[in-house]
């Protein structure tokens, strides 16, 4: 007991933070879980008790961090800082309650608190790159929570349908909720979206069962399922951080790259989605991370975890297969480079296939055998639909960027939702949906007149930033003097072009406005951000052009993140 007390007395914030940093996935899940009772993921459920709960949680966290961590250097200073922080938190909650639970106010007050906290850490000499990124991730989780609270199953969703309805992802979740693990005894093509592998929907159904067992009202429980996508989106930040560190990003370049991922609208929107996109993205990023770990340390442990990531990714959404070619390259390169030690690799590859293949394909094979469903089945939409663009010449679809006011209306264009035309260019659709997504109640000036100015500003900043990131990725991966080894660069190039080419092939094969969406190639965001981080890191020579590039990168990244926060609080 005396030893424990002695350790606590000598504990510094740096020590305290390092112990938390060893378990980033657990910390993120716990932070997200702590937000769950706060409104049960629906703004209509917010009440004074929600904010009392928030005050208790904030007070507990502040107590641990400020008193136990001794941020001020001694207990007296820590107690004073804690008192000030408690008064600030209580005052913020009072303001929010008085302003009818304004979610925008909640986010900005929280952000101000984070900034003040960062200043205190800086004064105390405890603010470093990892701490700043941790605060940034916390702020990003809050932004995701705000988005989830004002987004329900009918807003900015994809093929979700309705709960207590006949089709869609919501109905698919309810199937597993009502039937346990009993597989459908009918052709899955008969009900919209049932063709998808079931992992995501099973997990959502399990959480729904837990909610209802705890006595939560069914409709409230259905909306509260968004906590899972929110967790997946938040975990993507941690995996992205690990990928950035694997290419030796640190300091300002690492902060730059993390800021884009933390506050990118795509990850915020997918964090509130009821479908399976964000879970598959998480597993794809995890697969990339563990593939590179296996390449660096070719052990059974690493290849087993890699097999689980790819298998579970494809069990979430079949398109997760697109990480496989890059992974296969690492396997083949390692095998032939060390052909004399082939006995070392063959058992590992057998274990990989035995684990990965059944997880990845059991659903498709079962449906193919039972009902003749093609392994790669994707439902084809009605060509008579207004959103069909197959009647437009292919060259125009791919290379026409200006006709019809495409860049004047910066939101994804659906005439059904008030747009002047239907989107037909996959590239333009990619840029637009990366910021605003699409669909009913989508983010557009039609639904949200208040973004008349901020929407276009964010759009054009994002386009410029993405094009710079795209060029930076290609340059950093193709040049010989890159700080990344050749094999890793080839891995990333294969990873990148498989997703990019697949996106365009999919858009050509299924020429519909709803197909031109960033959700079919989300990992490109992380890959391009890696390129920007490397380019900034490698600009060591203080030439005029290098300084201009660095300033451009920092200014545009800050503007992008700030305007993203503005947009998502405006539509709150």
Image (cartoon, helix red, strand yellow):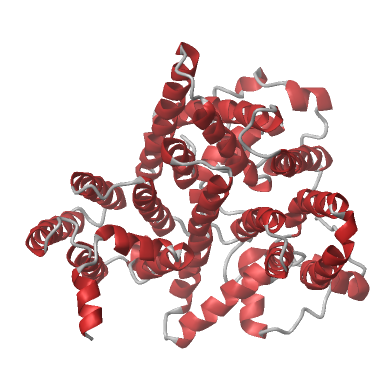
Q: Quadrant of the N terminus?
A: bottom left
Residue at the top extreme of this rendering: 544
Spot occupied by residue 377 in the image (x, y as percentages of width and height):
84, 58
Q: In the rendered image, which quarter is residue 157 located in?
A: bottom right
Q: Nearer the viewer, residue 261 or 226?
A: 261
Q: In the rendered image, which quarter is residue 78 located in?
A: bottom left
Spot occupied by residue 557 in the image (x, y as percentages of width and height):
44, 32
Q: Residue at x 39, y 59 (%)?
A: 149
Q: Residue at x 90, y 76 (%)?
A: 370
Q: In the rendered image, which quarter is residue 361 located in?
A: bottom right
Spot occupied by residue 177 in the image (x, y as percentages of width and height):
61, 80
Q: Is residue 165 above or below residue 339?
A: below
Spot occupied by residue 358 in the image (x, y as percentages of width and height):
81, 72
Q: Is residue 1 above or below residue 442?
A: below
Residue at the front extreme of this rendering: 340
Residue 154 at least partly seen:
no
Q: Is residue 267 left or right of residue 40?
A: right
Q: How many marks?
A: 0
Q: Nearer the viewer, residue 364 or 515?
A: 364
Q: Is residue 27 above or below residue 148?
A: below
Q: Nearer the viewer, residue 543 or 3?
A: 3
Residue 122 at least partly seen:
yes
Q: Residue at x 80, y 28 (%)?
A: 392
Q: Is residue 256 above or below residue 3?
A: above
């Amino acid at each position: 007991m005396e030893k424990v007390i002695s350790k606590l007395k000598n504990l510094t914030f740096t020590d305290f933070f390092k112990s938390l940093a060893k378990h980033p996935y657990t910390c993120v899940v716990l932070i997200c879980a702590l937000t769950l009772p706060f409104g049960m993921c629906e703004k209509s459920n917010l009440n004074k008790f929600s904010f009392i709960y928030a005050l208790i949680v904030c007070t507990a966290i502040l107590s641990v961090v400020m008193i136990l961590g001794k941020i001020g250097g001694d207990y007296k200073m820590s107690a004073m800082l804690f008192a000030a922080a408690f008064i600030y938190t209580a005052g913020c909650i009072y303001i929010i309650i008085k302003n009818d639970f304004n979610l925008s106010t909640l986010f900005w007050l929280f952000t101000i608190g984070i900034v003040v906290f960062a200043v205190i850490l800086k004064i105390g000499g405890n603010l470093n790159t990892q701490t700043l990124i941790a605060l940034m991730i916390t702020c990003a989780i809050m932004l995701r929570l705000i988005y989830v609270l004002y987004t329900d199953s009918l807003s900015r969703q994809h093929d979700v349908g309705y709960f207590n309805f006949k089709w869609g992802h919501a109905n698919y979740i309810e199937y597993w909720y009502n039937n346990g693990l009993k597989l459908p005894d009918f052709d899955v093509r008969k009900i919209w979206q049932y063709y998808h592998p079931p992992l995501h929907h099973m997990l959502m159904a399990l959480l729904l069962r837990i909610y209802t067992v705890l006595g939560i009202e069914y409709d409230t429980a259905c909306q509260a399922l968004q906590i899972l996508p929110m967790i997946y989106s938040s975990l993507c930040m941690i995996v992205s951080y690990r990928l950035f560190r694997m290419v030796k990003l640190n300091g300002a370049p690492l902060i730059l790259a993390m800021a884009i991922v933390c506050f990118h609208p795509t990850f915020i929107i997918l964090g509130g989605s009821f479908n399976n996109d964000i879970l598959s993205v998480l597993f794809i990023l995890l697969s990339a991370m563990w593939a590179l770990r296996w390449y660096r340390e070719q052990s059974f442990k690493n290849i087993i975890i890699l097999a689980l990531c790819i298998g579970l990714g494809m069990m979430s959404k079949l398109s997760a297969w697109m990480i496989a070619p890059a992974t296969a390259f690492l396997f083949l390169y390692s095998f032939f480079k060390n052909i004399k030690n082939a006995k070392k690799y063959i058992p590992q590859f057998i274990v990989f296939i035995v684990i990965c293949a059944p997880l990845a394909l059991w659903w498709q094979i079962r449906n193919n055998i039972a009902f003749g469903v093609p392994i790669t089945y994707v439902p084809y939409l009605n060509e008579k639909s207004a959103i069909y663009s197959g009647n437009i010449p292919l060259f125009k679809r791919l290379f026409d960027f200006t006709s019809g006011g495409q860049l004047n209306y910066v939101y994804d264009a659906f005439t059904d939702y008030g747009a002047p035309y239907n989107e037909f260019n996959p590239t333009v659709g990619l840029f637009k949906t990366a910021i605003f997504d699409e669909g009913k109640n989508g983010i557009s000036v039609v639904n949200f007149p208040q973004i008349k100015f901020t929407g276009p500003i964010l759009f054009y900043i994002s386009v410029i930033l993405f094009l710079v990131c795209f060029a930076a990725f290609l340059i950093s991966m193709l040049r010989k003097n890159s700080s990344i080894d050749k094999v890793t660069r080839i891995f990333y190039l294969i990873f990148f072009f498989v997703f990019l080419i697949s996106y365009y092939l999919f858009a050509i094969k299924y020429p519909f406005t709803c197909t031109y969406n960033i959700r079919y190639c989300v990992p490109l965001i992380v890959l391009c951000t890696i390129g920007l981080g490397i380019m900034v890191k490698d600009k060591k020579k203080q030439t005029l052009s290098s300084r201009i590039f660095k300033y451009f990168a920092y200014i545009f990244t800050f503007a992008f993140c700030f305007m993203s926060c503005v947009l998502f609080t405006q539509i709150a």
